[in-house]
Image (cartoon, rainbow, N blue to C red):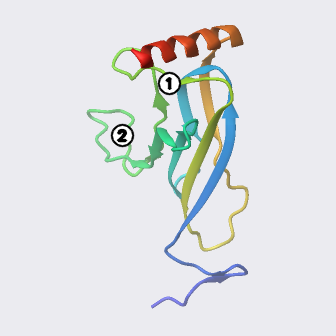
Amino acid sequence: PPREQRSRFGADCECVHTITYHWSIDNKSLIYAGGHCHAPSCLDISLYRNDTGTPQLLCRQATKYGAGDVKHDKFDEADFVALPPCLWEGEGLDPAPWLGPKTPMVSVKRNRNTRLGHFGEMASWQMRGIPFPAHRAQLADRKAAVVARS
């Protein structure tokens, strides 16, 4: 058996390193979210809104390995690692989630351990949304409150 590999940080292990990041977003309808996650050490990255105190999953990206079926899908290269983004709005897609004023957001990223120390990890997202001025956001929130009461 191979000798146990060590770095200055200790022995390698079959463990998962989790990174959590908190921030807020103002007045956007989210249409695209792509987590910043380096393959192949990235297991997955999840995006939550947390405006109720109970995190609600908006997007989860998990590594997807190509099967090599390029005859049916020209992008399905064997063993190619991809992290498909989350998309909203448009034909066949879910409606865009509305993120009102100061919506608390949480990102959780899980990485495999590596044999050597790995610096510069983050749990950030590249996102696109449709911005709304504050007065339109207030109108949308009022409309949602009326619908919720009926």
On screen, residue 45 above or below 114: above
Q: Residues within 10 Å of mark 2 (few under 14, many from 20)?
A: some
Residue 36 in view, yes or no: no
Mark nearest the camera among 1 and 2 is 1
Q: Report the amino acid beneath label 2.
A: Asp
* Residue 27 pos. (x, y %): 65, 20
On screen, residue 23 above or below 31: below
Question: Residue at coordinates 61% horizontally, 29% vertically from top-left?
Answer: 127
Question: Residue at coordinates 48% horizontally, 21% vertically from top-left?
Answer: 96
Which quadrant, please, contains the C terminus? top left
* Residue 77 pos. (x, y %): 38, 43
* Residue 98 pos. (x, y %): 54, 22
* Residue at the extreme front: 149
Distance from disc 1 to disc 2, alpha carbons, whole Å, reads 30 Å
Q: Secondary structure at mark 1?
A: loop
On residue 76, the disc is: 2
Question: Which residue is label 1 attached to?
Answer: 97
Question: Residue at coordinates 43% horizontally, 19% vertically from top-left?
Answer: 148
2 left or right of 19?
left
Q: Nearer the viewer, residue 106 or 120?
A: 106
Q: Nearer the viewer, residue 81 or 21?
A: 21
Question: Residue at coordinates 36% horizontally, 40% vertically from top-left?
Answer: 76
**Counting residues from the N terminus, which is met first, the one under dot 1 or under dot 2?**
2
